[in-house]
Image (spheres, rainbow, N blue to C red):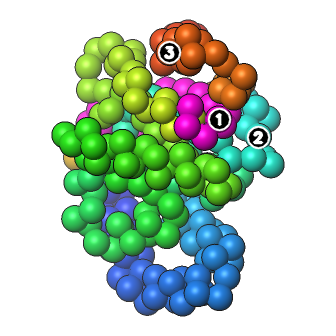
Amino acid sequence: MIRLIVVLIFVLIFLLLSLIIQPIMLLTGLFSKSARDKASQAIVNWAFRIVLFMCGVKAEVKGEENVPKDEAVLYILNHNSFFDIIFTYPRVPRPTGYIAKKEMLKFLTLTWWMKLLHCEFLDRKDLRAGMKTINSAAESIKNGYSMAIFPEGTRNKSEEPMLPFHAGSFKIAEKSDCKIVPVVLYNTAAIFEDHLPFIKKAQIKVEYLPPVDVAPLSRDERKELPDKIRDMMLTAYLQMK
């Protein structure tokens, strides 16, 4: 319980300070979007690393050399915990937005940070609005910002190692002809979700699989992408166990 209280106090202080920091970031963006992006990313990375330290998270990370450093990509991640984002975001080599559910928009201070970091908000019940989000994410990649999405659509609370992937998640890569970097996360729920409301030390595993280049794929090959990527990730996940 002590870890949870300490983390909550830190998050509260950070969000209060954000009321001062965020307007500065917005003003910075009027003169230099690049400077705003770098500063916003550095601040959030720092906050996430502090949270991970407070939680006592230890990680075994493999395959980071597979992540392209000189181009925007689409990260495909399996989803078991709130900590999936907290752990993976500080490791991205360039500004990266995550696809989040529309319900996150009600958390105003947090929402502003997400917007500063080029996150997109997906309405899972409105297909037309969902397609606009996919198109916007594809445009972000074309403009040099990587994107990350959890194609399971929600946190996996089942006994299955991985939920089915929604094919629509891969439209971002198809529309931008970018590379897909599959990211496999293991045991992240052991930090918090497995024993709510307590936060406990945990040893997690993360593996970045070799990127899949979408640009040269045929229409049929693109249709097979969701199953192909899921099979790759599932194999890696089961090997982690």
Q: Are marks 3 and 1 in contact (CB under 8 Å)?
A: no
Q: Earlier in the sequence, mark 3 or mark 1?
A: 1
Q: How crowded is the residue under tag 2: few (<14 C-alpha within 10 Å), some, or many (20+)?
A: some
Q: Is residue 183 magenta?
A: yes
Q: Is residue 8 magenta?
A: no
In magenta, the rendered stretch is 174-195
* Res 223 label: 3
Residue 205, above or below 148: above
Q: Residue furthest front?
A: 219
Q: Are marks 2 and 1 in contact (CB under 8 Å)?
A: no
Q: Secondary structure at mark 1?
A: loop
* Residue that label 2 marks: 68
Q: How crowded is the residue under tag 1: few (<14 C-alpha within 10 Å), some, or many (20+)?
A: some
Q: Position of residue 158 (x, y in %)?
A: 26, 19
* Residue that label 1 marks: 177
Quadrant hosting residue 213: top right
Q: Position of residue 224 (x, y in %)?
A: 52, 12
Q: Earlier in the sequence, mark 2 or mark 1?
A: 2
- Amino acid carrying mark 1 in the image: Asp
Query: Taking 217 as reference, is 191 left or right?
Result: left
- Amino acid carrying mark 3 in the image: Lys
Residue 12, above or below 86: below
Query: Taking 126 as reference, is 50 left or right?
Result: right
- Amino acid carrying mark 2 in the image: Pro
Residue at mark 2 to residue at mark 1: CA–CA distance: 14 Å
In this view, the residue in front, 12 or 74, is 74
Q: Nearer the viewer, mark 2 or mark 1?
A: 1
